[in-house]
Image (cartoon, rainbow, N blue to C red):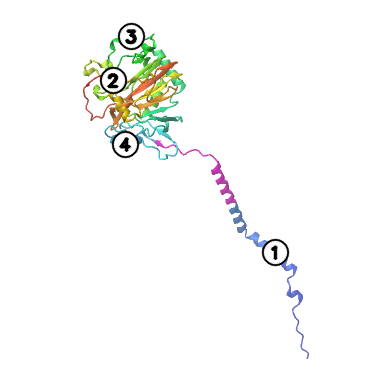
Amino acid sequence: SSTPKRRGPTKAASSTSPASSNDKASSSRDSAKQDPFGAVLALALLLAIICSLGALGWYLYTPHPPAPAPAFTVEELQKQAKDAFEQKEVPVPEPVNPGSTPVLKVLPRKSEEGFAAWDPVAVGHVRRLQLDATSRVYEMKTVALDPPIFVLEDFLTNQECERIKQLALQTGLFKSDHTFLDGSNLNERFKDTSKLSVEEANALFRYSEQTWLPPTNDALLQRLIARATTLAMLPPQASIESMQVVRYGVEGHYESHFDSEADDKGPCCIDPVSRSFATGVEALGRPLTERCRLCRVMTILYFLEDTPRGGGTVFPLADMNETEYSRWSAFPSYRQTRDCGPGVVVQPKKRQAVMWYNHKLDRGYLGALNPRSLHGGCNVKDGIKWIANHWISTVPHPDVPRVAAKTHQ
């Protein structure tokens, strides 16, 4: 028998054929089509990166509106008032964010708490206030610390300025009382002052003409009073007197004086004039039952016209150092209006308001008269000066006894 020969592997069996390679590639593509998760995940990740970059760019380069203004109710601003003692003024808390100037929304007063004085903070300090339901913002700037004096430009509108002057002319202007507060020239009270020389005019304590405007039914005046009430943060026991409107001609002036009176002038009442009580010179020689001291805790003055030259309001003792103040107290002078100095001066500018405190505060009520609230109307050198003002009156704390007047000098 013969043994069969073994065959080795053939060439075809030991190598990969082209047909087999194509089958594997086709199989790989088929598998990718059947499981697309990886491709989708990669596409989603790319889209997320693109969206994130777009959002970041929008945030960085698109201007955004400021955060809502913090709203402070007057109750919040005055929560320290009832704890304030010994003629200490109650500061209004500042916004939490000192690096910006937010708008403070001052809301109408609702409770029976007393006054809270605006803290002057520093000369030049500016607050931005919203005082009504409109979007109008008022800037209040500190111009003195003692007494606190604030200036608000564009507090009035042109329409309000013109309306006040129109109402004053319709009501009728009369000569301002030019007698000195001690009554020393009372016999000259009815002197004709229509045609005076410069020297004769400067000899008068006051050289102007004026009238009074009750709010009545005039909508414009009522809106102004509402705005002033909110600005002053008036408690219910305070009142605003009828508006005084004054016109000064050339050399018109008002010697340095106080809008209110110290407690040695007798018992106090709110707006004594409207209640037929005598005050100041009028009260000389009157029985106690017929007279009352003025209790004007603060004043808001309005400039109704631009005055070309002169006519500023001067506060000769405002922020005066103690040495100079002691020197003045020893030899008081009230004739700073000729040269409109020394002192803090606010020049007349149409639509502008000036607000200051005539008294310290005592537990949120009327405290002692601040002698540094002395002020005067400087001589008008050119043109006409029109002003108006609201006096805000209130009463002392109920614990303070009502005493008889010691003097009216």
Residue 191 — which label? 3
Residue type of the residue flagged with mark 3: Lys
> How far apart, in angstroms, are the residues tagged by discs 3 and 2?
26 Å
Amino acid at circle 1: Ala
Q: CA distance from mark 1 to mark 3?
A: 121 Å
Pinpoint residue 312: horizontal percent, then vertical percent. Answer: 41, 21
- The span picked out in magenta is 47-71
Measured in 3D between alpha carbons, the distance from the residue under mark 3 to the one under mark 4, in whole angstroms, is 51 Å
Indicate which disc residue 202 carries: none
Among the two numbered marks 3 and 4 on one chain, the one whose residue lies closer to the N terminus: 4
Contact? badges 3 and 2 (CB < 8 Å) = no
Question: Which residue is identified by label 4?
Answer: 80
Pointer 1 or 4: first along the chain: 1
State the residue position of label 1.
Answer: 25
Disc 1 vs disc 3: which is toward the camera? 3
Q: Amino acid at mark 2?
A: Pro
